Image: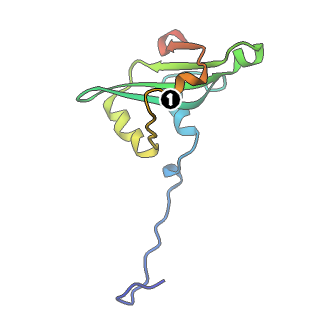
């Protein structure tokens, strides 16, 4: 396709790493040596505390509990999540803001774990 000046438009190439894939949540866990074969990430939460401080958590299916037939959704709180991580990660996710009365608690999350409790 040509623009008004008669020059062909440059086609933008989409880099594979820029695509939004489920693996991006997994990298947050893998960087902290959390077993992604057991904890399958399905969502995340980010809360801005002040200036350059964020709380982050990853909502996961605990495969071990799932196989046992017990409540299996867990929220893993990332204790060492940094502002730099947030700035790099936020480019690859979509934020959907829900009213206060409609939140992830409706998912029946069974446990909240600190990443240090998983080792």
Q: Residue 95 versus residue 22: which sits nearer the camera?
A: 95
Left or right, 63 with reference to 58: right
Q: As rendered, which of 73 and 19 lies closer to the eye?
A: 73
Q: Residues within 10 Å of mark 1 (few under 14, many from 20)?
A: few
- Secondary structure category for the residue under label 1: loop
Q: Residue 46 location, x and y as percent? A: 41, 29
Eyeballing the image, is 45 above or below 3? Answer: above
6 left or right of 24 in image: left
Q: Residue at x 49, y 83 (%)?
A: 1
> Count of labels shown?
1
Q: Is residue 27 left or right of residue 56?
A: right
Location of the C terminus (image quadrant) = top right
Expressed as whole percent of the image width and height from the top left, the position of residue 90 reads 40, 41
User: Is residue 71 shown left or right of residue 106?
Assistant: right
Q: Residue at x 50, y 29 (%)?
A: 102
Residue extending farthest to the left is 51
Who's the residue at 47% across and 26% down the image?
A: 101
Residue farthest along the top direction in this orientation: 117
Give the residue at x 53% y 28%.
30
Say if 19 sits above or below 13 in the image: above
Residue 100 point in image, percent of width and height: 43, 28
Residue under numbered circle 1:
102
User: Looking at the image, which residue sits at the far bottom?
Assistant: 6
Along the line of sight, which residue is nearer the eye, 37 or 65? 65
Dividing the picture into quadrants, the one containing residue 6 is: bottom left
């Amino acid at each position: 396709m040509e623009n008004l000046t008669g020059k062909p438009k440059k086609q933008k190439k989409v880099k594979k790493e820029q695509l939004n894939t489920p693996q991006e949540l997994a990298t947050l866990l893998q960087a902290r040596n959390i077993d992604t074969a057991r904890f399958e990430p399905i969502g995340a939460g980010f809360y801005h505390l002040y200036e350059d401080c964020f709380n982050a958590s990853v909502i996961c299916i605990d495969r071990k509990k799932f196989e046992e037939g017990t409540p299996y959704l867990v929220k893993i709180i990332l204790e060492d999540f940094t502002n730099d991580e947030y700035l790099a990660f936020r480019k690859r996710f979509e934020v959907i803001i829900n009213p206060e009365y409609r939140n992830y608690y409706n998912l029946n999350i069974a446990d909240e774990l600190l990443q240090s409790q998983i080792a």
